[in-house]
Amino acid sequence: MSALDLMNDPFYAQIMFVIESSICKADCDAQEKGLRLTDSNIKSALNKARHLSVKPVPGPLETVQSREEIIHELATSIAANRELFRVETETPSGKEKASISCAEWVKAISAVEASLNLRRSDEAGSRCYLDFVGRFIKEGRI
C-alpha cells in the first residue's frame, strides 16, 4: 500500500488528522508571532518527527520564538503524539487500549508527507499544502 493510499484507510486517516492538526496549530502559533511557515518548513518538521519517533523524544523548548524553534517544537509534538493516540485491541482478557506501534506512526507521517508532496508547489515560499490542510482541518472540526 502506498503512502497516498493510507489516506483512504480509516485507521491511518485518524492518525493523519492528529498530525495535520498539530501542523495547523504550529502554523497559527507562527502567525501569532509574526512568522510565516512554508511547505518546506513543514517537510523539514515531518522529517525530524520521523527520526524523533524512533528515538527518545526530547522535551519541548521553554520559549519558541524563531521559525527553527517552531519547526523543532512541531516535530517534537508530532513524535510525542504517538503516545497519546490509543487504539482498541482484543486480548484474552478483553478489550484494551494500547499505543500504536512506532512503525504505524512513521507510516502515518510518511502519508502526511505524501499529501504535502502532492499539494505543494516548487515555488520558493510556497504554502499550497498549508493552505489546503488549514481548510481541511477547519472543515473536519465543524
Image: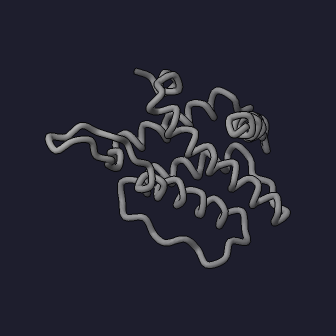
In the displayed orientation, state which residue is furthest to the right: 34
Answer left or right for 4 relative to 39. Answer: left
Answer left or right for 122 relative to 14. Answer: right
Answer left or right for 15 relative to 119. Answer: left
Residue 82 coordinates in the image, percent (x, y): 43, 51
Q: Nearer the viewer, residue 121 or 133?
A: 133
Q: Is residue 51 above or below residue 103?
A: below
The number of discs equals 0
In the displayed orientation, state which residue is furthest to the front: 94
Q: Residue at x 61, y 45 (%)?
A: 43
Residue 50 coordinates in the image, percent (x, y): 45, 49
Q: Which quadrant would residue 25 be assigned to in this image?
A: bottom right
Residue 127 coordinates in the image, percent (x, y): 77, 40
Residue 66 coordinates in the image, percent (x, y): 72, 68
Q: Residue at x 19, y 40 (%)?
A: 91
Q: Nearer the viewer, residue 21 or 59?
A: 21
Q: Is residue 31 above or below residue 40?
A: below
**Image quarter (top left, top right, bottom left or bottom right) of the C terminus:** top right
The image's colouring method is one colour
Q: Nearer the viewer, residue 87 or 106?
A: 87
In the displayed orientation, state which residue is furthest to the bottom: 62
Q: Is residue 78 above or below residue 138?
A: below
Answer left or right for 19 relative to 94. Answer: right
Q: Is residue 80 above or below residue 129?
A: below
In the displayed orientation, state which residue is furthest to the left: 92
**Image quarter (top left, top right, bottom left or bottom right) of the N terminus:** top left
Q: Residue at x 55, y 71 (%)?
A: 60
Q: Residue at x 68, y 71 (%)?
A: 64
